[in-house]
Amino acid sequence: KKDDSEQSKLSPDCPEEQQDDDNDTKEHHQTRTPMEAFTKKAREDVDDTLNLLKQLNVTYSSVLKYFGEDENMPSNDFFGTLQSFVVEFKKAAEHVEKLERQRLKEKLKKAAKKVV
């Protein structure tokens, strides 16, 4: 059974452990148990992930603001709307291109009749 001082070292919210991590020495690193090393690495990974999530939320909020949407809009609603817009935009662009090709074809026909 571990004593209280060892138990507090393994607690993720323990200030002593963070201080211990800050003062990490080569000697201490070599005596760290595999579980301590795993816990330290896992905590760093979680912290990194949480920081990325914060950045993502800030970026998402700015995108919503840019498009004039409510900042509390769920992402699946926003991206669903965006996808629908893109699909309809592509359909409209294809329709306009088709009309332009038809107009050009008619123009060429009229020009060819004048030449003959």
Image: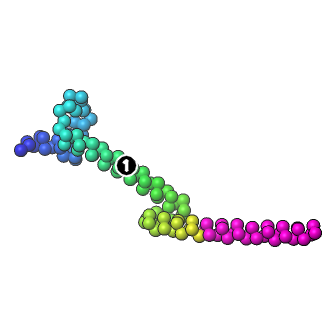
Q: What element carries label 1?
A: helix
Quarter of the image with the N terminus in it = top left
Q: Is residue 42 among the parts visible in the rendering?
A: yes
Is residue 18 shown left or right of residue 74?
left
What residue is pinned by disc 1?
51
Work out whether 22 lies above or below 85.
Answer: above
Q: Is residue 15 among the parts visible in the rendering?
A: no
Quarter of the image with the C terminus in it = bottom right
Q: Which residue is drawn at 38% across and 53% down?
A: 53
Is residue 74 shown left or right of residue 42?
right
Q: Which residue is drawn at 42% across and 56% down?
A: 57
Q: Give the range drawn in magenta.
A: 89-116
- Amino acid type, mark 1: Asn
The chief SS type of the magenta part is helix
Q: Which residue is drawn at 84% across and 70% down?
A: 109
Q: Does the magenta stretch include residue 114?
A: yes
Q: Is residue 58 magenta?
A: no
Is residue 29 shown left or right of residue 91?
left
The quarter of the picture where residue 30 lies is top left
Q: Where is residue 54 in the image (x, y as percent from the top left)?
A: 39, 52
Q: Where is residue 18 in the image (x, y as percent from the top left)?
A: 24, 40
Q: How many marks?
A: 1
Q: Give the farthest residue toward the left.
A: 1
Q: Which of 37 and 53 is in front in this view?
A: 37
Q: Residue at x 90, y 71 (%)?
A: 113
Q: Where is residue 72 in the image (x, y as percent from the top left)?
A: 43, 65
Work out whether 44 lies above or below 77.
Answer: above
